Amino acid sequence: MNYDNSKKSLHGKAGKEELENLLKGFEENQFVKDIVKDYSVGYGSHDNNQFKTHFLVQFLDNEQWIITSTTSVRSDRTKGNQWEAYNIKQLNKNVTRAILTYPDGINEKEELNAKSYNRKIQENNIYSEITDVISISDLFDEIEQKVLQSKSPNSKRALEGNSFEKRLVVILNNKGNLKKWNSQNSIEVGLQFPIFSMILEAFGMKNDISINKISATDKISKLPSGGLPKTDVLIKFYFENKPTQTYTVSCKRTRNNKVTIHEYSVDSFIKALCLEDKRLIESLRSLQKVGGPTALKNNYPPDYDYLNNNLINYINQLSKWVYGGIGGEGNPNEHWAYYIVSYNNELKEVSIYTIDDYIKQAKNIAGQFNTPFTWTYASGQKGKSLQLKGPVI
């Protein structure tokens, strides 16, 4: 085997390993029933292992997909993949999709080839037993949507958010990503490496300083009050000759422009914002009593005007507390989030912001009382707490 072929072989092997890591994550979270590695079947008296694929995934409803990893979508290869897919689907009628998946961040030529071939399939320009040729990020989304399609809207939203947090943990803990970052070796594939790279760059990490280990977790302790902290993912970086560095991230994922992001009593607002303005405190108590700006304006017009004119003086403190928990209760190194990672469901795009950059953009979106937020109350909590809905960037 010459050097180029050896390199391609190692590249392909790395791609398959990262696909396995992705699928194992779904299995561990009980999103799928079973995963069969190196699945093979055959006809009757012939070779029972004649037709092969890298993985067979069985979902909770018993639907099955076959998934093959590739780092190159060439016509000679796809003909072989088509033959395998045709026969596997003939022999196993539970298989509904045959997917070719390629790593994120492959070279531009290979990515264009893959997208072109997939477009031919989706537009019915060619007969194909392969149903999709997609990136590993798109595969993640496809499996997730398959799992969520039978869920109620509320359950779906909760699972989507939880899934995104776990997705980041898997990406950041992936050893292939760390190898690729440290070595910049084109053989290494990594798992959704562009997301990994974007997050590290946002943290100010440089390739010229080797990282020994990354430890990411979504297991964050509760606040002293028993509530949930703003930090969703805590990440630690370990170096050879540098102190450990810790970063805290809040995750946002939604299809809506504004979502509920905060709910506390006025007493908590006073403490977190270090309020000494008695008139402002009185106005906030009136707001909590009546439940919203319209009722406040109708019943306590001076309090409405005072909030409208003076709450803006606390906009940065308020926003940092609302989005990051900063200034509130808990351990600043664990419970306060200094970065926000958001996922746009429509565009399927991941973005990362410092808390300050996120707030700067949020302040451009009009809310109530000259803040980015909509002020209301949760069901059954009128007179007890204030609920804030805020923009998701």
Image (cartoon, rainbow, N blue to C red):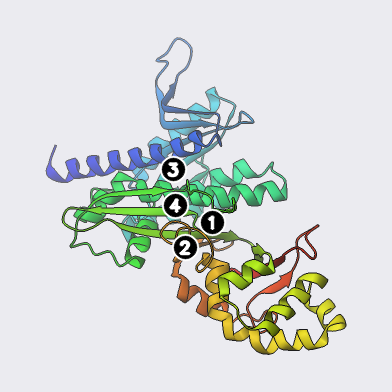
Q: Nearer the viewer, residue 317 or 348?
A: 317
The residue at the point 56 percent across, 75 percent down is 274
Residue at the left extreme of this rendering: 2
Q: For numbered disc 4, what is the local secondary structure?
A: helix
Residue 229, label in figure: 1
Residue linked to disc 3: 100
Residue 104 appears at what percent x and percent y?
38, 53
3D distance between C-alphas at marks 1 and 2: 8 Å
Residue 132 in percent (x, y) is at 50, 46
Q: Amino acid at mark 3?
A: Leu
From the viewer's side, name the closer residue of 262 and 63: 262
Q: Secondary structure at mark 2?
A: loop
| Callouts 1 and 2 close, C-beta under 8 Å | yes
Vertical side of 246 occupied by 37: above or below: above
Where's residue 325, x and y in %?
A: 53, 64
Residue at 29% across, 41% down: 14
| In the image: residue 216, left or right of residue 257 | left
Residue type at the position of mark 1: Pro
Q: Badge 3 local density, few (<14 within 10 Å), some, or many (20+)? A: many
Residue depicted at x 33% and y 46%: 71
Mark 1 touching mark 3, by CB under 8 A?
no
What residue is pinned by disc 2? 337
Closer to the N terminus: mark 1 or mark 4? 4
Residue at the image position 38 percent from the left and 54 percent from the top? 235
- The residue that mark 4 highlights is 168
**Side (left or right) of 164 relative to 62:** left
Horizontal and vertical percent position of residue 237: 29, 54
Q: Quadrant of residue 309?
A: bottom right
Between 37 and 112, the residue placed more toward the observer is 37
